[in-house]
Image: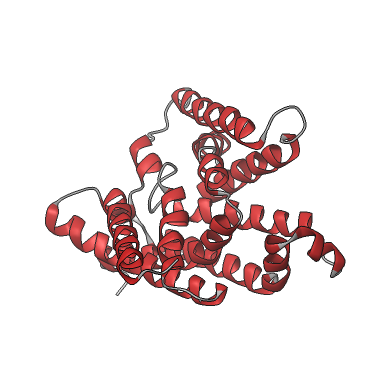
Amino acid sequence: MLDDFMMRAVLAGLGVALAAAPLGCFVIWRRMAYFGDATAHAAILGVALALALSVSIFAGVLGAVLLMALLVSGLSHKAYAMDTMLGVLAHSALAFGLVAVSFLHGVRVDLMAYLFGDILAVGKGDLAVIWGGGVLVVLLIALRWQGLLTATVNPDLAYAAGGDPKREQLVLTIALAVVVAVAIKVVGALLIGAMLVIPAASARVFSSTPERMVLVAALLGGASAIGGLWAAYWLDTPAGPTIVCLAAIFFSVSQLWQLVSGRP
């Protein structure tokens, strides 16, 4: 079954949708959309470092994105606001990454594949990384679910209940780094933020509880992956961007449904 490149692509898309759904919901609830998008820009620097140091792409991207997220969290609210630090560090990391790639002599790098994804070239090893990382993220968020929800609703309430909102923020930061590392092969560094935010934003209209929103986001993300691959095959379009386009169409439908049904 895994010898079929389309089947590997479908499984890769479903793996990313599974990992992105719960994290994307927290990104929406905490208004961290720009945070997720900006930290993903550091993935290209991670790719360059991984190739230069001859380590796995997953390890390089995971390290660079995690460092970027911790830097932003540590430096914001001191001299500059969070969005300012995100703007400075995200674009700087992307620029340094592109420059670093140009210094890699004797290494063939397909930058477009890392910027926009190359899901049709996913191999069996990539599938193991994607599903391993996805399951890790789901388990991490499931274990910390109640603490994450309480810290998201009210940090003071979390402190009163014996929790630590900073620890929960660190959990989300680690989960975000893992999702970026596993998704770079599927939708690329520039579109990872879309797979985090769009299915979760669409699911919000059809959900009355946090748990249902996560489930609906996973279903919409999976449908976007499968439908986007099918559309890319028949329309001869790039697969990663087509997946994101279908997710955006689902979002438009959800907004239309909200308008027609009169839901707040």
| Among the 4 quarters of the image, the one containing residue 35 | top right
**Residue closest to the eye, 130 or 208:** 208
**Residue closest to the eye, 54 or 15:** 15
Q: Could you tell me residue 174's position as x and y percent? A: 65, 54
Residue drawn at the location 70% of the way across and 29% of the way down: 80
Give the quadrant of the C terminus. Answer: bottom left
- Residue that extends furthest to the front in the rendered view of this protein: 262
Q: Could you tell me residue 245's position as x and y percent? A: 28, 52
Q: Is residue 255 left or right of residue 130?
A: left
- Number of labels in the image equals 0
Does residue 110 show up? no
* 144 vs 86: above or below: below
Q: How is the image coloured?
A: secondary structure
Residue drawn at the location 54% of the way across and 66% of the way down: 22
Q: Could you tell me residue 83's position as x and y percent? A: 60, 35
Q: Is residue 80 left or right of residue 226?
A: right
| Among the 4 quarters of the image, the one containing residue 159 | bottom right
Residue drawn at the location 67% of the way across and 71% of the way down: 145
Give the quadrant of the N terminus. Answer: bottom left
Residue drawn at the location 53% of the way across and 43% of the way down: 34
* 146 vs 181: above or below: below
Q: Is residue 117 left or right of residue 69?
A: left
| Among the 4 quarters of the image, the one containing residue 211 | bottom right
* 198 vs 215: above or below: above
